Amino acid sequence: MDEGNYTAEHHQFRSSVKGFVKNTIVPHLEQWERDRRIDPAMFVEAGRQGLLGFSIPVAYGGPGVEDYRYNAIVIDEVNRVGAAGVGIAFSLQNDVVLPYLTDLTTEEQKARWLPGIVEGRTVLGIAMTEPGTGSDLTGIRTTAVRDGDHYVVNGSKTFISNGQNADLVVVAVRTSPDRHRGLSLLVVDSGTAGFVRGRNLDKVGLHSQDTSELTFVDMRVPAANLLQEEGRGFYQLVHNLPQERLSLAVGAVAAAEGVLALTLDYVKQRTAFGQPISKFQHIQFVLAELATEIDIARTYLEDCIRAHVAGKLTAARAAKLKWWTTELQVRVADRCLQLHGGYGYMREYPVARAYLDARIQTIYGGTTEIMKTIVAKDLGL
């Protein structure tokens, strides 16, 4: 941790987050993994303890703090204990979806939506990905046709995080055929007629995260739920991606640090040929390499957090950070599982969950390949 990046207030906040993680997340994590979703009461408790909606203005019940470091501390502490699915839920609530509802809304919209978010009564989701459309936002086919004071929405989305728990979903829709200027964002209450939750998807990892399919059948959404004006959706989505990718990197580095720490403990206790396996030079070298790479990643991450707080984090730099740290997370989890031997393949060992949860990191939020394309464009290629 870069001590120069944080104040005494940040350290005090981190202590409270640690307590929340220890008392509210860790005891229930196994049950949430089995249930394939987080108990919504967790969000309410997080709101009660002041862990949600930092940027929400005081007038709407929030702290009114525009400081991403608080967001990062929450993600860091949750992912460090191997609760990656919960970390995604927090990231959606604070980092990914919330900026749309604070930065692109009217005063009337803020008054309707923000108080419930900061209190944890309103769980957020964002619906971009479709069955035939992943990283290419211009391929979105869900339609929204204006009909008086409403939009009639038809289409389907998939891989939607918080899909079962979400109360309010920012939905990317097509309001005209233009590939870029034909996209718009509608905020949809999950109780709206025609809003259909599909199955909770059976994923390789992140089992506590309720990732779902959503279908919209002649769903009538008030025109008052449009974010700004029609045709701005593509640009609104792209604008918020750097912070989303920064948040994924925070989770990646914290998860890598967490799995390294538990592996260090394991190799000191596990014996072979009459001595702890930590005494074998090969194992020492593997762990030394991982510790060095994680240290490099943490240093780069903290520099990017500093840049973001100053409003200077570029899309290209966020892309570099996202692909490098998530690929590192996968590599660290893989090598740490190897050092656990056969026990590492057992689901009862935390390293197994770390291995399974890591794999999606190089895919969602923009694949490694897409991140490299962004970097290449920045290089003028």
Image (cartoon, grey):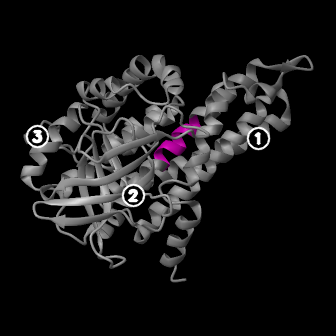
In this view, the residue in front, 326 or 266, is 326
Magenta stretch: helix, strand or loop mostly: helix
Between discs 3 and 2, the one toward the N terminus: 3
Is 302 magenta? The answer is: no
Label 3 to label 2: alpha-carbon separation: 27 Å
Mark 3 in CB contact with mark 2 (< 8 angstroms):
no
With respect to residue 243, does 75 lie above or below? Answer: above
The CA distance from mark 3 to mark 1 is: 50 Å
Above-or-below relation of 250 to 34:
below
Seen at 71% across and 36% down, the residue is 336
Q: Residue at x 24, y 36 (%)?
A: 122
C-alpha distance separating marks 1 and 2: 39 Å
- Label 3, secondary structure: give it: helix
Residue 60 bears which disc, if any?
Answer: 3
| Outermost residue toward the front in this view | 218
Q: Residue 252: where, in percent of width, then height?
A: 53, 45
Q: Which mark is residue 359?
A: none
Pair 3/1: label in front: 3
- Please give left or right for residue 62 compared with residue 302 in the image: left
Q: Secondary structure at mark 1?
A: helix
Tell me if residue 346 comes above or below residue 180 in the rendering.
above
Q: Is residue 251 magenta?
A: yes
Residue that mark 1 sits on:
286
Residue 128: give its label.
2
Give the camera-side residue of 300 and 168: 168
Quadrant of the drawing holding the C terminus: bottom right
Between disc 1 and disc 2, the foreground one is 2
